[in-house]
Amino acid sequence: MANTDASKTAVVTGASSGIGEACARTLAAQGFHVVLGARRVERIEAIAQEIGGTAHQLDVTDEASVDAFVAATTAAGPVHVLINNAGGAKGFAPVLEADLDDWRWMWETNVLGTLRMTKSLLPALIDSGDGLIVTVTSVAALGHYDNGAGYTSAKHAQALLHRTLRGELLGKPVRLTEICPGMVETEFSLVRFDGDAQRAADVYAGVTPLIADDIAEIVGFVATRPPHVNLDQIIVKPRDQADAGRVHRQH
Ligand code: 8X3
């Protein structure tokens, strides 16, 4: 699974923890030069140092931050891979009690964040002659569940943005892969429940969830296929999860 061309550069957003960090480590182990982006700059600097990558602060909700990140990255050479991983959920409320600020955060990070990064980096990905965009959506991009409309609607919108590119980029040297994970134990639930560790732990109680490395291994497989092989969409869930709202718990 090694990347034979060690000069290839891969950008990972949301690389300070969880799936993003795991993807950065996996891609670096495969020989990519990895550029890590996240708001928590000390964390990505430490990871970059360990894996021989580069860290640039990145807030995908801020156009100037995205532009500066992309300018610094493309100035260093061609870019072949973009992993759109930044995003997440905030809150768990019925529509009747929806928190508009939570919705705005989810749409800004998942949807407009993916748009900003993709739009800004796309010319470089095309110019590389062998580009790849992996967007980490969710099983929440495939269905809906009670109290989840802010997140499921944002994930649907992010996914549709990504899937639209598959047609718009036909004939261009860019592959597109959507990864739709189910439950992955990361900081995801801690962020969703505003730091409430007990509530976050309850999400995974009695279930063996996926871990970030499970997703990173798949991303690594995708990134090391030959240029003519496009894995369009990959849905990955724990064995105990049937869909976004339905899990089996061992008690
Ligand atoms: C999160 C997926 O199944 O935990 O993206 O709601 S799930």
Image (spheres, helix red, strand yellow):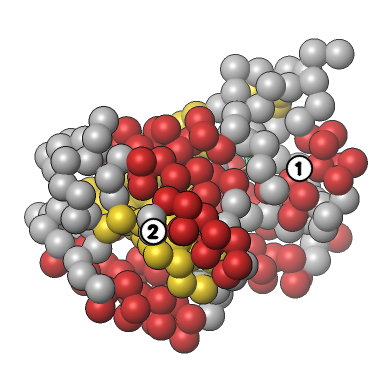
For the residue carrying disc 2, how many other residues have a C-alpha within 10 Å: few (<14), some (14-19), or many (20+)? many
Per the image, the residue denoted by label 1 is 146
Q: Residue at x 76, y 42 (%)?
A: 146
Farthest residue toward the bottom? 64
Q: Which of marks 1 and 2 is nearer the N terminus?
A: 2
The number of numbered discs placed on residues in the rendered structure image is 2
Whether the residue under disc 2 has CB within 8 Å of ligand 1: no
SS class of the residue under badge 1?
loop
Farthest residue toward the top? 250
Per the image, the residue denoted by label 2 is 53
Q: Nearer the viewer, residue 76 or 39?
A: 76
In front: mark 1 or mark 2?
A: 2
SS class of the residue under badge 2?
loop
Ligand 1 placement by image quarter? top right
Q: Nearer the viewer, residue 155 or 9?
A: 9
Q: Which residue is drawn at 30% across and 40% down?
A: 30
